Amino acid sequence: MHLKNNRPKPTNGFYGAFGGAYIPELLYPNVMDLEFNYQEIIQEPSFQKEYQQRLKDYVGRPTPLYFSEKLSKKYGANIFLKREDLNHTGAHKINNAIGQVLLAERLGKTRIIAETGAGQHGVATATACALQGLTCVIYMGKVDVERQATNVQRMKMLGAEVIAVASGSQTLKDATNEAIRDWINHPTETHYVIGSVVGPHPFPDMVTIFQSVISEEIKKQLKKQTGKANPTHVVACIGGGSNAAGAFYHFINNNKVQLVGVEAAGHGINSGKTAASLAKGTDGIIHGFMTKLMQTSDGQIVEPHSISAGLDYPGVGPLHAHLFTSKRGQFISITDKEALQAGLDLTKTEGILPALESAHALAALYKLKLSKTDVVVVNLSGRGDKDLTTYLNYL
Ligand SMILES: *Cc1c(COP(=O)(O)O)cnc(C)c1O
């Protein structure tokens, strides 16, 4: 993972008009420490050796690139699935969690904090901390602690302390506020592991680098399987946008590859119950960065809705806001129902039960105009065991 000069990266922390570091004065030392060190540490041979070894022997990488004959026949194109669902802990989030925890160790940190909504990022972070033997504190809204009891148990078994946040709406954004407060109060020994390509610079870039292993592998695997390293389309769902950023990364500078990001429309983009931040959002600042944001005219955050917890975020990473505004990327919204149907279809036809998040990416295949020679890679970000009850309720 050598960081080439021409890699897709922010300029002074900005992707076009989006990104930056809009943070309170008190957070400056923490964020500057990262900013000055992250690129150098990530390129150190000893870091790379340990990270790559963990990805291979612990996470189970490379994940397969699976050619789906049935989807190919159905859509009249060559459809491949990148199997991030086969990672240890069941999704792509572990790529980033392990990367950041290893980086934190090299920064001399001994304590890790993170925020989590549904608990997926909390579990990935607690897993990485168990592996490296670091103290782990997870902030989670009180409502989410009650809704996601199994993931809370898992985090505790992994040795993490889970703090139920009782302020505000007692969900993700309140947990994020508490985690930021904790970081301000413990600047020297603590690293804050953010779970997607969001937050102040350098988090979006750092998380993108850790997830870029996805497109690095896609290139090699496609070359081997088809003779050509570049697909015509890469399709990925977007919550904050980390699995999409990783799947797009090595193709961003090649305009022949269409980048397709899939947002959660919820009940429909005009229903008032949606998480389609690009379709419905306006420019605004959330969690320390400028992006497209679902907000009222006076700047209050509009509560997002999606059937999949991982896509239930009112903003989107700055890279995606830029790909959207510059029209380099194509963005599609998929409703709860369309995602559920696509997930059930894949389960029945291929024997793969996808996470509801990933099912949004699969459903987007219906909306693309594809031809016989097209080579389409869908990033299957995670497995659907966690969503079983939701699928069953729909049936
Ligand atoms: C968390 C999650 C997502 C959404 O996060 P991104 O940062 O947008 O990738 C997507 N899929 C799965 C399986 C997840 O757990």
Image (cartoon, rainbow, N blue to C red):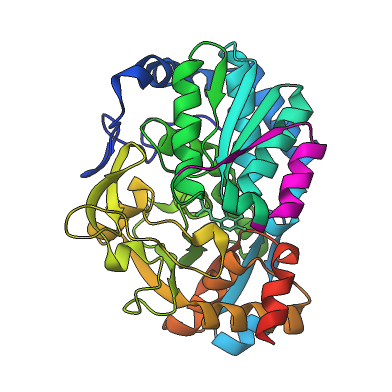
Query: Splitting the image into 4 quarters, where does residue 48 fall?
Result: top right
Residue 165 highlighted magenta (yes or no): yes
Q: Quadrant of ligand 1?
A: bottom right
Using residue 79 as the reference point, say whether residue 331 is left or right of it.
left
Q: In percent of the image, x 43 and y 80: which residue is there? A: 368
Position above or below: 106 against 95: above
Q: Residue 161 at x, y = what percent?
A: 70, 32
Q: Residue 172 at x, y = what percent?
A: 50, 48
Q: In percent of the image, x 43 and y 15: which residue is there? A: 33
Start and end of the magenta stretch? Answer: 147-167
Q: Residue 308 at x, y = what percent?
A: 56, 66
Using residue 17 as the reference point, say whether residue 227 is left or right of it.
right
Q: Residue 321 at x, y = what percent?
A: 30, 53
Position above or below: 237 against 119: below
In the rendered image, which quarter contains the C terminus?
bottom right
Position above or below: 28 against 350: above
Res 352 seen here: yes
